[in-house]
Image (cartoon, helix red, strand yellow):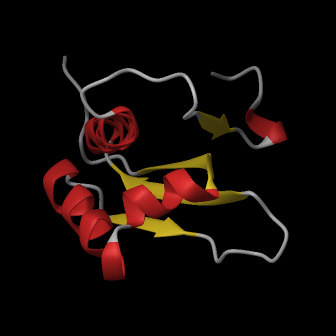
Amino acid sequence: AGIDTGISFQVKVMLDVKDAGKIFGQGGSVLRRVQHVSGCTRIHFSPSKPGSDHRTALLQGSAPSIVIGLSMFSLLLCGEVMKTVSSISLLINKKHVGQI
């Protein structure tokens, strides 16, 4: 029993551009720390597009590492005071809808 950490997953989330900037940090410093602490094998943000108010982040790794990475995203966005302005949207490929 237990969680098989040998299986690699990918999760895409969509964030507001301002919130993505908080997670990315200056020169990617915060993002590198999140990747290291969470154990994700890769965390990558899509390039910003002119006129778009959202960016997509891709997290890759074991299920536990992705859960930790998303939890860290939430903590970075909310800080000590819970606010309702920030949101993270989980993006699911339409061929996988209904399997989750």
Instruction: Measuring from the top left, give residue 35's x and y in whole percent.
Output: 26, 60
Instruction: Measuring from the top left, give residue 62's x and y in whole percent.
Output: 31, 46
Locate residue 78: give its quadrant: top left
Residue at (63% x, 21% y) in the render: 100
In the current view of this chain or complex, which residue is farthest to the left? 37
Please state which of residues 59 and 29 is positioned toward the viewer in this rendering.
29
Above or below, 61 against 27 in this view is above
Left or right: where 39 falls relative to 92: left
Instruction: Measuring from the top left, give residue 7's x and y in whole percent.
Output: 35, 46
Residue at (62% x, 59% y) in the render: 17
Q: What quarter of the picture does the N terminus occupy? A: top left
Please state which of residues 13 and 84 is positioned toward the viewer in this rendering.
84
Query: How many numbered tags mark residues here?
Result: 0
Locate residue 28: give its quadrant: bottom left
Instruction: Measuring from the top left, give residue 19's x and y in whole percent.
Output: 51, 51
Please state which of residues 1 and 68 is positioned toward the viewer in this rendering.
68
Left or right: where 60 falls relative to 3: right
Locate residue 40: give its quadrant: bottom left
Residue at (71% x, 38% y) in the render: 92
Please state which of residues 9 and 90 is positioned toward the viewer in this rendering.
90
Residue at (26% x, 64% y) in the render: 30
